[in-house]
Image (spheres, rainbow, N blue to C red):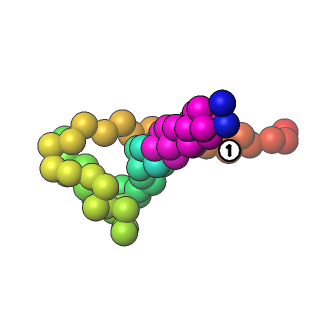
Amino acid sequence: MSKKILTLVMAAAFVAGTVGVSLASRYVKCTVSAVDGATVTLDCGKKAAKLKAGMKVKVKNAKKKAVEGC
């Protein structure tokens, strides 16, 4: 019985670790360095190795802070 529980716990830890690593590699923060017509150049620093040519990416606008006051 103890071996079954230990095996189950080890399998769950492996799955959780694998999912965590895959989710962490999905997000890369970059800055726009140039825009030329329909071409946008991104500067991702050291994390650029996670991206490959031809890969589809999703780009979000930076959130603007609300101006309070009169």
Q: Position of residue 37 (x, y in %)?
A: 18, 45
Can you name the residue that lies furthest to the bottom here?
Answer: 46
- Magenta stretch bounds: 3-19
The secondary structure that most of the magenta stretch takes on is helix
Query: Does the magenta portion include 47?
Result: no
Q: Position of residue 10 (x, y in %)?
A: 56, 42
Q: Position of residue 33 (x, y in %)?
A: 32, 61
Residue type indicated by callout 1: Lys
Query: Along the line of sight, which residue is nearer the eye, 36 or 23?
Result: 23
**Could you tell me if residue 65 is visible in this image?**
yes
* Element carrying mark 1: loop
Query: Along the line of sight, which residue is nearer the eye, 69 or 14?
Result: 14
Left or right side of 35 for 30: right
Give the residue at mark 1.
65
* Residue at 40 percent of width and 56 percent of height: 30
Position of the C terminus by quadrant: top right
Query: Along the line of sight, which residue is nearer the eye, 34 or 53?
Result: 53
Q: Is residue 49 above or below residue 38?
A: below
Query: Does the magenta portion include 15?
Result: yes
* Residue at 41 percent of width and 57 percent of height: 31
Query: Along the line of sight, which residue is nearer the eye, 14 or 44?
Result: 14
